[in-house]
Structure formats: structure tokens, C-alpha cells
Image: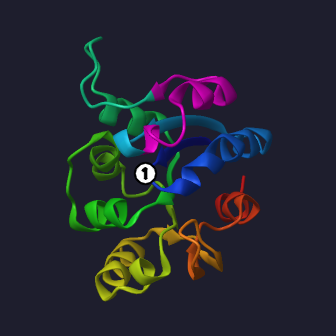
Amino acid sequence: MHILLGITGCIAAYKTPDLVRLLSKAGHDVRCIVTDNGARLVAPHALATVSGNPVHTSLWQENGTIPHIDLMRWCDGLLIAPATAHSLAACALGLANDLLSTAFLALEPHKPMWFAPAMNTVMWNKAVVQEHIATLADGGAHIIEPISGELACGEEGVGAMAPLENIIAAIGS
């Protein structure tokens, strides 16, 4: 399966090179979109190295392509991991302010989409975040629930990105 992995600006982004490696090992061909904030946490070059594919960071390509359309035609499914509160909101509300959210809107309705949220417990429990999760789930998205544990901020609670094995299992083969 061709998986497009969207990586956002959450500290859990440091896990994504391992996620790409595990997806590839499971037989998937992986390409990545990294948001500006995601690129502050994981190097696009590292993702290109482990995926064997170029990493996409901008709507504005110089080679005459339309990246959000081309990537959606290529992929069999879209995974956003980690999915921040911002990325969940952008997708739930249909905002298209970067390559990832624009690509999400261009995803054909029959193709699967998965979100692996990760954020502080207080953020995760906000009613508006839960409303966005519900909107995405009602639209057919698979939500790979965060787990409880120690968070990057030092607090304990629900909000840590699901273990990579859970994400792989949710996608299947």
C-alpha cells in the first residue's frame, strides 16, 4: 500500500523515522509531508533516507507539479502522525493553509485516513478538540487513540501518541 505520512509539530515527531521504517518493513511504500513546525522536530533528510523517497514540505514546488493533487493520486491512504490539535482542527474544519491540510482535502473519499493524535492532556480533553475528533471520525477517519503516560511537558495523562506497533496494526497490510 502507498502510505502518505503527514508529520506535524509535536514532540512525538521524533518517532516518525522509526514509524517510516516499520511501515516499510510491513510492505508499505511511504512518502512524507512535513509541516513547517514538524520540520523543526524531525529532519526531512532523515525521513527521505529511511523512506527512500523525497519529502514534501511546501505547496509551492518549482517543477510545475501540483503536489497536493499528485500525492493524493499516488497514495492509497493518508496517515497523520503525530496529529496535533491544530492539524485535527484544520482537517475537521476544511482549512487548507499548508501542504498537509490541502492534501487532506484532496484525498478521495474512498481512501482511508488515520490520525494518531498527540498532545498535552488538557488539550486532548478540551471539548473543541473532541468535537474535531468526532467530526473526523464521522467523516470516516480512523482515530488511533493516544495513550496515558508521562508527556513531554512532565505531566501524566492521556495524550501520548499511540505506540508505533498500534499504528502499524491500525493500518494493516
Query: Which secondary structure, mark 1?
Result: loop
The residue positioned 24% from the left and 25% from the top of the image is 60
| Residue 158 placement (x, y as % from top left) | 57, 82
Does the segment drawn in magenta span residue 43? yes
Q: Is residue 77 left or right of residue 23?
A: left
| Badge 1: residue crowd in 10 Å (few <14, some 14–19, many ≥20) | many
Task: Answer yes or no: is residue 112 visible.
Answer: no
From the viewer's side, name the closer residue of 89 and 40. 40
Is residue 133 positioned above or below 53 on the image?
Answer: below
The residue positioned 75% from the left and 45% from the top of the image is 22
From the viewer's side, name the closer residue of 132 and 172. 132
Query: For residue 122, which quarter of the picture?
Result: bottom left
Query: For residue 40, which quarter of the picture?
Result: top left
Query: Can you say which quadrant of the picture contains the N terminus?
Result: top right
Q: Which residue is mark 1?
A: 9
- Start and end of the magenta stretch? 38-55
The residue positioned 51% from the left and 67% from the top of the image is 118
Is residue 21 positioned above or below 162 on the image?
Answer: above
Q: Is residue 78 left or right of residue 46?
A: left
How many numbered circles are shown? 1
The residue positioned 76% from the left and 61% from the top of the image is 165
Amino acid bearing label 1: Gly
Does the segment drawn in magenta span residue 104? no
| Residue 28 placement (x, y as % from top left) | 68, 40
| Residue 50 placement (x, y as % from top left) | 68, 29
Is residue 61 positioned above or below 166 on the image?
Answer: above
